[in-house]
């Protein structure tokens, strides 16, 4: 049965049960808009929360970015990755504990999409590769909010998935009347995310609709499907969506290119194991 999306939107944007990190993100956004605020001041604000900064630095020093030396401060990370990428990592760190304990398969899937997005972005020589990598981590953030703020609805969706043997997004639309990309859109609005993060979160299932960050969205869409095909983690589906051919065409990738990307993905996935808590 569909539920009132406006009421659920209000509940999601209130973020009653998620960590209070979105408030930090709002403060970060305000700081960065000021021409008198330095990168060091932004970094110091994040590092004031020792738990948060430790999680952010752990993600930054993982295999995704491949920096040759260890990054020990958030300020250094801001210089190397830019504010938008670090902002996304702050959001990822905010839900890490939830995903790693209650949604392990989704966390593994998100890690896989992040790695795959980096592989594809580097092959295409995209200038904002770091942001696309972070977008891969965040692309299913709407599912986390749905799980936390509407656990009964989330369970009803999962029950429908098992009954239909289909896709999570199809069951969401049938049971709720909306899906996790809509929830992701609400969160993106609240957190004032930049296009390279917002579009992949809201449009990775329909990348041809992306107007502000078409390349980043196309890459995350492709990474999402390829990771599903390998079976690394699980986003809640019992099937694999069709890879949008126009998207592949827009990225100018051949079948041979895709084969090489898959090979590289399988070789790289073991590097993300340090971000998967041992059972």
Image: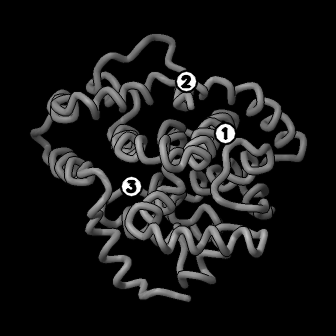
Residue under label 1: 116
> Coloured how?
one colour
Residue linked to disc 3: 194
Location of residue 111 with respect to 138 vertically, above or below: above
Residue at the (26%, 53%) spot, across then down:
22
Residue 259: percent from left, percent from top: 86, 39
Q: Is residue 232 above or below residue 147?
A: above
Q: Is residue 91 above or below residue 48?
A: below
Q: Nearer the viewer, mark 3 or mark 2?
A: 2
Of residues 27 and 33, the one drawn nearer to the viewer in this rendering: 27
* N-term mark: 3 or 1: 1
Q: Give left or right: position of 194 versus 19.
A: right
Quadrant for residue 46, please give it.
top left
Q: Which residue is mark 2?
A: 274
Specify the quadrant of the image occupied by residue 4.
Answer: bottom left
Q: Position of residue 65 (x, y in %)?
A: 52, 27
Callout 1: helix, strand or loop? helix
CB within 8 Å, label 3 to label 1: no
């Amino acid at each position: 049965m569909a539920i009132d999306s406006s009421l659920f939107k209000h509940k999601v944007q209130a973020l009653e049960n998620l960590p209070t990190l979105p408030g930090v993100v709002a403060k970060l956004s305000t700081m960065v808009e000021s021409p008198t605020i330095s990168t060091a001041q932004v970094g110091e604000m994040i590092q004031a929360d020792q738990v948060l900064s430790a999680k952010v630095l752990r993600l930054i020093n993982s295999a995704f970015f491949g920096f040759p030396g260890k990054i020990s401060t958030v300020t250094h990370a801001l210089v190397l990755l830019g504010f938008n990428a670090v902002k996304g990592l702050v959001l990822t760190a905010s839900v890490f504990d939830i995903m790693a304990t209650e949604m392990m398969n989704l966390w593994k899937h998100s890690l896989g999409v992040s790695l795959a997005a980096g592989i594809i972005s580097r092959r295409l020589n995209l200038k904002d590769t770091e942001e696309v990598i972070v977008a891969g981590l965040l692309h299913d953030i709407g599912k986390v909010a749905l799980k936390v703020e509407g656990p009964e609805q989330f369970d009803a969706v999962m029950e429908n998935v098992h009954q239909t043997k289909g896709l999570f997004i199809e069951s969401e639309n049938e049971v709720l009347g909306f899906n996790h990309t809509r929830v992701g859109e609400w969160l993106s609005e609240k957190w004032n995310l930049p296009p390279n993060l917002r579009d992949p979160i809201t449009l990775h299932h329909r990348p041809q609709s992306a107007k502000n960050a078409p390349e980043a969205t196309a890459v995350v869409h492709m990474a999402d499907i390829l990771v599903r095909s390998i079976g690394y983690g699980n986003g809640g589906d019992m099937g694999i969506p069709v890879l949008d051919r126009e998207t592949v065409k827009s990225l100018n990738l051949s079948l041979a290119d895709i084969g090489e990307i898959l090979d590289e993905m399988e070789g790289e996935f073991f590097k993300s194991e340090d971000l998967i808590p041992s059972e």
